Amino acid sequence: MKTQAGLGLIAVLAVALALTLAGCSGQPREQVRGHVVDVVVRNFTEVKSLRIRDEAGMIWDFKGAEGFIGFTPSHVKEHQLQGLSVLVSYVREGDALVAVHLAD
């Protein structure tokens, strides 16, 4: 029984690692800092989309990558309400900008 549980844990960790690496698929990451204008929630832990205004006043629209990207949607909303900036690391997928990580 312990062997099966150990194999199950290894399988879960392997899937988590694969999903993490998929988000880092070798595409160059870019960054922009700005204030949150809008956030749309995918679920409790995932951001579906994000709109920020950078320091020059330009509006940036992002799709949220699948999975946790550093902040929960509620934390992003806190930044919006308190007027705190966020640093968005993103990749380009065709015409879309995909937020892969958020930080203070």
Image (cartoon, grey):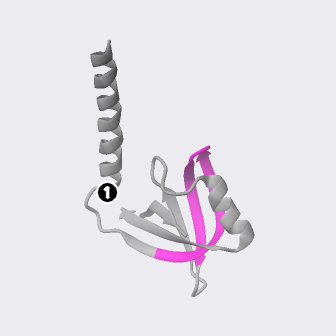
Query: From the viewer's perspective, is residue 22 above or below residue 37?
Result: above
How crowded pointer 1 is (Cα within 10 Å; few <14, some 14-19, many 20+) is rated as few
The residue sitting at 63% across, 61% down in the picture is: 76
Image x and y of residue 17, in percent: 31, 44
In percent of width and height, residue 95 lies at 41, 65
Q: Please report the residue visible at 32 percent of the width from the left and 16 percent of the height from the top.
A: 2
Magenta region, residue range: 32-53
- Front-most of 103 and 40? 103
- Tell me: 35 left or right of 4: right
Say what secondary structure mark 1 lies in: loop
Taking the view exactly as shown, the residue that stands out farthest to the front is 2
Determine the residue located farthest toward the top in the rendered image.
Answer: 1
- Horizontal and vertical percent position of residue 75: 64, 58
Q: Is residue 63 magenta?
A: no
The residue most toward the right is: 81
Q: Is residue 12 above or below residue 46?
A: above
Question: Is residue 36 part of the magenta span, yes or no?
Answer: yes
Q: Main secondary structure of the magenta part?
A: strand
Q: Is residue 31 above or below residue 56?
A: above
Give the total of numbered labels: 1
Query: Which residue corresponds to the image point at 74% horizontal and 67% vertical from the top-left?
Result: 81
Query: In the image, what residue occupies the spot 42% across and 66% down?
Result: 90
Tell me if residue 3 comes above or below residue 47 in the rendering. above
Look at label 1 and name its amino acid. Answer: Cys
Q: Quadrant of the N terminus?
A: top left
Relative image position of residue 14 (x, y in whole percent): 29, 37
Q: Residue under circle 1?
A: 24
Quarter of the view holding residue 77: bottom right
The quadrant of the rendering that contains the C terminus is bottom right
Residue 85, by quadrant, is bottom right
